[in-house]
């Protein structure tokens, strides 16, 4: 098992602020393998929280470069039939998808040389979209096996699935809901290759972070970590906080994240005269967030996610897993894959989406029921420890790779 060399293809990581959920997997893989981490389309600044050890090497390879084109021209002269094969394997059911696939050919030819020179023995791609198309093309050029992790929106995208699944050694999906989003013919044809393995987090012990909620008189602090985008449902949580204040509760809310709805959310807070109680903290380092969770800064974690139709909903938010692992009672909505994490009344509370009154009632339910809090905290921790443990889940994936 030790020192197998893996090409780990991401969307943009280690550049930009996204894909933090990949970090625990890279960390665990690096204990047993050497990793070359390559983004499909690097966007943004290089991250400051990069894992540093002798088994991880990060590469800054742009989506398109002049030397890729030069290599492709030479490749077309000496390998015309193989180039035609690559083009054929980029054809999808729409022009836009086909073009998105075709643009990856020059980079795949460049990476194929890198795979050979580094003696890469397996290719692993996160996202069924461009990263997997890149993995497929490199496989066709090198015959090195590849595996895939699919999430949610990329499952809905359905770009070139038959070819991607046909050549893949395995397809790992992060929830049972993700399987239901696959086209029926793909499910039936490739079911033996498809495995549900949840994303995982680092879990060490059950903290006493929320004990303070049992000792407070109508004053609580709530946390929500989510990009400020429509599917996250922030406006309904803010309306719920307003409702609690009208009932005489002193409730504070911190929102961690940024996004397109920031101005709209600020306006809503101002209109409801909640500036003193609701703070937008922007993006915080993961270590800082965990410090706040461990220190008991928050009494309740709330994720008011929405189902926007056409498959536009949450997967299983890692932030919810982490809050549960720190013993913070959680409230979320019965949408997407969230019910695979939260059993209503047992490991947290689930409410209807787009319903601020239901959110208000759930928060009050925790405030007025100390026994429920104690039960939920313990049940939630043990569920996350058993099913969403990064060490155990990474090992499950490695068994398919090695």
Image (cartoon, rainbow, N blue to C red):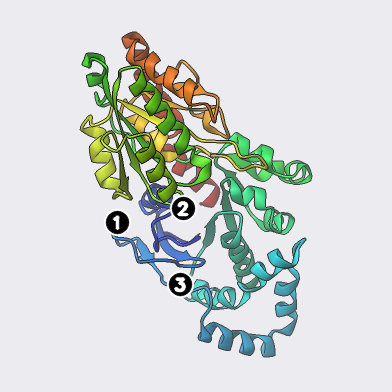
Horizontal side of residue 231 vs 101, given as left or right:
left
Mark whose residue sits in front, 1 or 3: 1
Does residue 28 sit above or below 4 in this rendering?
above
Residue beneath label 2, please? 260
Residue drawn at 52 percent across, 44 percent down: 230
First along the sequence among labels 1 and 3 = 1
Note whether residue 101 is visible.
yes
Image: 258 above or below 211: below
Q: Position of residue 235 (x, y in %)?
A: 46, 37
Q: Residue sitting at 43 percent across and 65 percent down?
A: 36
Along the line of sight, the residue nearer the viewer: 351 or 394: 351
What residue is pinned by disc 1? 49
Mark 2–mark 1 distance (CA, rounded to whole Å):
24 Å
3 left or right, relative to 105: left
Residue at left offset 53%, top offset 52% = 401
- Give the image location of residue 26, x and y in percent: 40, 53
Q: Residues within 10 Å of mark 2 (few under 14, many from 20)?
A: few
Contact (Cβ within 8 Å) of mark 3 with mark 2: no
- The CA distance from mark 3 to mark 2 is 41 Å
* SS assignment at label 1: loop
Q: Is residue 124 above or below residue 230?
A: below
Corner quadrant of residue 94: bottom right
Q: Earlier in the sequence, mark 2 or mark 1?
A: 1
User: Reading the chain from its start, which is encountered first: label 3 or label 2?
Assistant: 3
Q: Residue at x 31, y 58 (%)?
A: 50
Residue 118 shows which numbered tag? Answer: 3
């Amino acid at each position: 098992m030790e020192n197998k060399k893996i090409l780990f293809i991401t969307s943009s990581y280690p550049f930009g602020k996204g894909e933090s959920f990949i970090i625990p997997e890279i960390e665990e893989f690096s204990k047993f393998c050497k990793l070359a981490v390559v983004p499909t389309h690097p966007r943004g600044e290089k991250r400051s929280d990069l894992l540093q050890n002798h088994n991880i090497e990060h590469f800054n390879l742009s989506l398109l470069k002049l030397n890729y084109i030069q290599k492709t021209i030479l490749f077309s002269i000496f390998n015309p039939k193989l180039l035609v094969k690559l083009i054929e394997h980029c054809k999808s059911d729409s022009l836009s998808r086909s073009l998105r696939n075709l643009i990856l050919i020059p980079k795949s030819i460049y990476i194929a040389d890198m795979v050979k020179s580094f003696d890469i023995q397996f290719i692993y791609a996160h996202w069924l979209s461009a990263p997997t198309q890149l993995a497929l093309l490199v496989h066709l050029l090198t015959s090195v096996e590849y595996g895939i992790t699919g999430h949610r929106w990329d499952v809905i995208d359905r770009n070139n699935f038959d070819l991607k699944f046909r050549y893949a050694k395995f397809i790992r999906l992060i929830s049972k809901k993700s399987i239901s989003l696959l086209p029926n013919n793909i499910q039936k044809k490739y079911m033996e290759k498809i495995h549900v393995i949840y994303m995982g987090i680092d879990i060490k012990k059950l903290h006493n972070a929320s004990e303070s909620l049992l000792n407070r008189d109508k004053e609580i602090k709530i946390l929500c970590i989510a990009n400020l985008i429509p599917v996250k449902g922030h406006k309904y949580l803010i309306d719920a906080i307003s409702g609690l204040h009208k009932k005489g509760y002193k409730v504070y809310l911190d929102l961690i994240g940024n996004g397109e709805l920031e101005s709209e959310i600020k306006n809503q807070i101002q209109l409801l005269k909640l500036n003193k109680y609701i703070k937008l903290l922007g993006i915080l380092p993961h270590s800082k967030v965990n410090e706040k969770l461990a220190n008991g800064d928050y009494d309740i974690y709330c994720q008011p996610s929405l189902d926007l139709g056409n498959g536009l909903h949450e997967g299983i938010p890692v932030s919810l897993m982490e809050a549960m692992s720190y013993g913070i009672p959680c409230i979320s909505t019965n949408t997407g894959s969230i019910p695979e994490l939260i059993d209503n009344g047992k490991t947290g509370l689930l409410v209807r989406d787009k319903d601020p009154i239901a959110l208000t009632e759930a928060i009050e339910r925790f405030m007025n029921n100390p026994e429920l809090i104690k039960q939920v905290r313990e049940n939630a921790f043990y569920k996350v420890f058993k099913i969403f443990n990064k060490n155990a889940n990474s090992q499950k994936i490695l068994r398919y790779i090695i």
